[in-house]
Amino acid sequence: MPRKPIVRYSDEELAEFKVLIEGKIAEAKKNLAAYLDAYSNAGNDTMDTAPTFKNLEEGNMVLSKEENGQLAARLEKYIKNLEAALIRIENKTYGICRVTGKLIPKERLRIVPHATLSYEAKMNQNK
């Protein structure tokens, strides 16, 4: 019985995606550091001691702190997904849809480099 040919991206293509993903990880880590810095410094401002505006500002800082925390959590998840994509590159399974087994188009991977589903599989999942 003839074996099905293994469908995957070439080593050169995988190397291209690796560079793209490493760049995205570096950018995301830089943004994460900024969010975490803003999160940890929110509310520690000793410059303003005017009691009139204190309550309003504290309300804004809490919201800002919560938003920074949520954004930081989303970035951490994004970084983990990108790091998992690097592992798939090393295993030479990157870009293969986990549902259909077909190659995910390069255009989709350039936009969502951590994608594990083809567009069709993603749309069927959302039905």
Image (cartoon, rainbow, N blue to C red):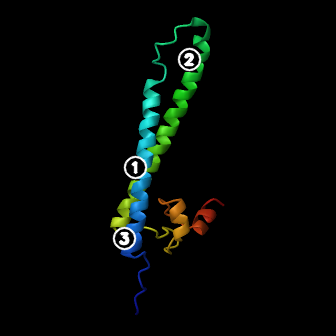
Residue 61 position, x and y percent, is 55, 22
First-in-chain label (1 vs 3): 1
In the rendering, which numbered label is found on residue 64? none
First-in-chain label (2 vs 3): 2
Q: Amino acid at mark 1?
A: Ala
Residue positioned 43% across, 76% down in the render: 8
In this figure, which residue is indicated by the disc labeled 3?
92
What is the crowding at mark 3: few (fewer than 14 residues within 10 Å), some, or many (at least 20)?
A: some
Tag nearer the camera, 2 or 3 = 2
Q: Amino acid at mark 3?
A: Lys
First-in-chain label (1 vs 2): 1
Q: Can you say which quadrant of the picture contains the N terminus?
A: bottom left
Q: Is there a contact, CB below 8 Å, between mark 2 and mark 3? A: no
In this figure, which residue is indicated by the disc labeled 1?
26
- Numbered disc 2: secondary structure: helix
Q: Seen from this angle, which residue lies furthest left? A: 90
Mark 1–mark 3 distance (CA, rounded to whole Å): 22 Å
Query: Does residue 80 show up?
Result: no
